[in-house]
Image: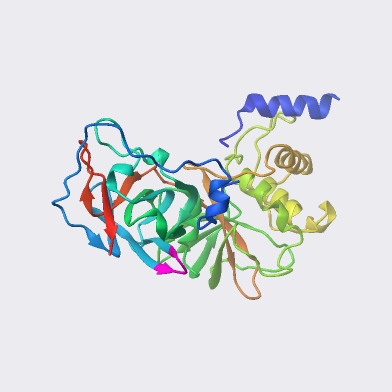
Amino acid sequence: MKKLTLAVLALFAFTFFACEVEPAGESLEAVAGKGQIKAKKNDNSIEFDFSEECLKSESILYAGQNIEVGKVTVSESGGNYVITYEITNDDWCITETHLSVVNSPEEFPITNSGNPKNGDFEYSDEFDCEKTVTYEVPAEKGPYIAAHAVVECATSSPETIAANLPETVEFCTVDQGPDAYLNITIAEGSLAGSYGSWCIDNDSPINLDNCYTADVYSLDDELPEDAFEYPENFDLVNWLLNQNIVGELSPSSGEAYTYGDLQFAIWKLLDDIEDEDCEACALGDFTPEHVTELVELAQEYGEGFTPECGDVTGVILISEGVQPLIIPIPLECSPCEETAWADGCDFPGNNWATYFQFD
C-alpha cells in the first residue's frame, strides 16, 4: 500500500468530523485425489537422442541455463524415490517446482516440437521462498526424472530481506527531528547508515549522544514476551511509517503534522499511554487532535498492512534496559526470477530443458 493522498485524508477527515498452497512431499493418494493424470506416451515424430548418457543420483540445478543455484538428489526408501530440491547458493530460493517421473523419456509431457510442458508435470507446488523441497514418488513410475523449478533472487522480496537481517547491531543516538523522533547511526554491517527512528515503549528511557548494542527483529519475528502492550498493532505502525506523514497538512486543522504527533500516535498504538502522561514528554510540538487523527487513520487503513518493494518495513531494535526503537528500512528490491532445470540429457526441442535417469 502506497502513501495516502491528501484527497483520501480529506475524505476521512470529512467523514470523521462531519458525522492454501499445499505442502511438498504429499502422498501419492493426495496427488491422485486432485485428478492428476499419468503422462501418456506422446504421439508425435519427435525423437530423443538415446546416445546421451545421464545416469546419476545427484544433478546440478541450473538457473538461467548457466547459474548453479543448487542440486536435485534422489534416493530410494520403502519403494519410493525421495527427490529433493536443495538450494545451495545463498542468493537464491525456490518459488515453484514442477516434477515428472516416467518409465521412458517419450512419456514426459512435451509439445509437438519437443519442448517439455512443465505445467503438465504430475507434481507441482508454489512457495514464498524455500531453500529445500522434497517429494516422495513411487519408484514404479520409472527411472527418468525431469525436475524443473522457478527460482528468485534472495533479495527480491520483503520477506527475504527481513530474513537476512543481522542478529545484532551497534547504534548511536544523534539528535531529534525534524522528520523523526530520534536520529541514529549504525556504523557497520548490512544495516550501516543513518536512520530516523521512533521509540516504541514509553516505559523505558533512551539518551542522546549514547551508543547501544541491540538485538534486531523483523516484524514477522517472535518478539520477546511482554515487551510491548499491543504487539498486534505493529502492522498499523508499519502503515504509518509508509505515509511520510510528517510535514503533511492535517485536513482538520490545516496545520502540518509534526514528528511529535507521529511519535505520540505510535506510543498510543503500542503502549498504555494517555494524553496527560505525556505532558512532560520530550516530543517537541504535538497536537492531541492530530495524534487522534493519526491513530484513527492507522486503525482504518493499516490493518493487515504488508509492505511491498518500494515501501519501507519496520525493523525493531531492542537494547537491555533502554527504550526499544523501530527504524524504517527501504525495500529497494526488484523482481529477479529465473527458470531452473536439473542437469542431464537434453529434450529434443529448441530449448535448454534437461532430464536425467536415476542410477
> Is 249 included in the stretch rendered in magenta?
no
Which portion, as a residue range, is magenta?
76-80
How would you classify the magenta stretch by its main secondary structure? strand
Quadrant (top left/top right/bottom left/bottom right) for the C terminus: bottom left
Residue 154 showing in the rendered view? no
Residue 218 showing in the rendered view? yes
Placement of 192 over or under 8, stated as above or below: below
Q: How many marks?
A: 0
Placement of 259 over or under 220, stated as above or below: above
Closer to the camera in the image, 142 or 285: 142
Residue in view at x 67 percent, y 53 percent: 234
Residue in view at x 55 percent, y 71 percent: 214
Point out the residue furthest to the left here: 51
Quadrant (top left/top right/bottom left/bottom right) for the N terminus: top right
Query: Left or right: 136 with respect to 294?
Result: left
Closer to the camera in the image, 140 or 137: 140
